[in-house]
Amino acid sequence: MPDRAETRATFGPIAEKITAFGGQATLVEGATLDPKREADLAAQTNAAREEEYAEVVRETELFLEHVRREREHRELTFAELEEIEADLGKLKRWVEQIRGRNHFGATAAGRADELLVQCDAALAAFIEAAYVHSGEISG
């Protein structure tokens, strides 16, 4: 992992917990790789993050399609709203987990972030439509 304060802050407590449970953990700081190997490792890691972001993008596009279909079919129940909110929460947590592993600056997060903004807007529109549909507010 890159030698960064946040990396040390993450792995230090993990190593302590391993030791507390009777295991052995060694954190090595300051190790260096030759420049080619370092570049290859960063490229491999970035490729893995790019694949993860691409999967999130696909799932986010499916989420947006699902919300659109539910609104078209007037399935505007509060149970459906809770399900949609939970699904969006999962997508957001997924992106944050990937971002936490993005140690070498993979750039595909931008598209996922753009789609999450669209998801927030779709959810807001669904909430409004559900309330109008239920008669709790007027449209």
Image (spheres, grey):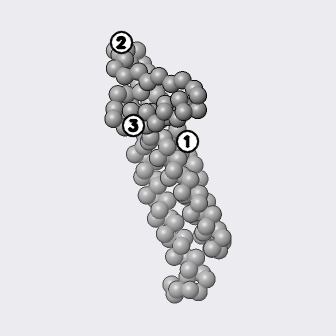
Between disc 3 and disc 2, the foreground one is 3
Is residue 23 toward the left or the right of residue 31 in the image? right
Quadrant of residue 107 in the image?
top left
The amino acid marked with disc number 3 is: Ala
Is residue 62 toward the left or the right of residue 116 in the image? right
The amino acid marked with disc number 1 is: Glu
Where residue 105 appears, x then y in whole percent? 37, 34
The amino acid marked with disc number 2 is: Asp
Residue 55 circle label: 1
Density class for disc 2 (Cα within 10 Å; few <14, some 14-19, many ≥20) is few
Element under disc 3: helix
Labels 2 and 1 touching (C-beta < 8 A): no
Element under disc 1: helix
Residue 11 circle label: none
Quadrant of residue 129 in the image?
bottom right
Name the residue beneath numbered marker 3.
9
Labels 3 and 2 touching (C-beta < 8 A): no
Disc nearer the start of the sequence (1/3): 3
Q: Is residue 13 above or below residue 82?
A: above
Where residue 96 appears, x then y in whole percent? 47, 47
Between disc 1 and disc 3, the foreground one is 3
Label 1 to label 3: alpha-carbon separation: 29 Å
Name the residue beneath numbered marker 2.
34
Where residue 27 appears, x then y in whole percent? 43, 24
Element under disc 2: loop
Where residue 1 appears, x then y in whole percent? 41, 27
Residue 24 makes an appearance in the image: yes
Disc nearer the start of the sequence (2/1): 2
Between disc 2 and disc 1, the foreground one is 2
Q: Is residue 78 above or below residue 105?
A: below
Q: In this view, does 4 lie above or below 31?
A: below
Q: Which residue is drawn at 59% across and 86% down?
A: 135
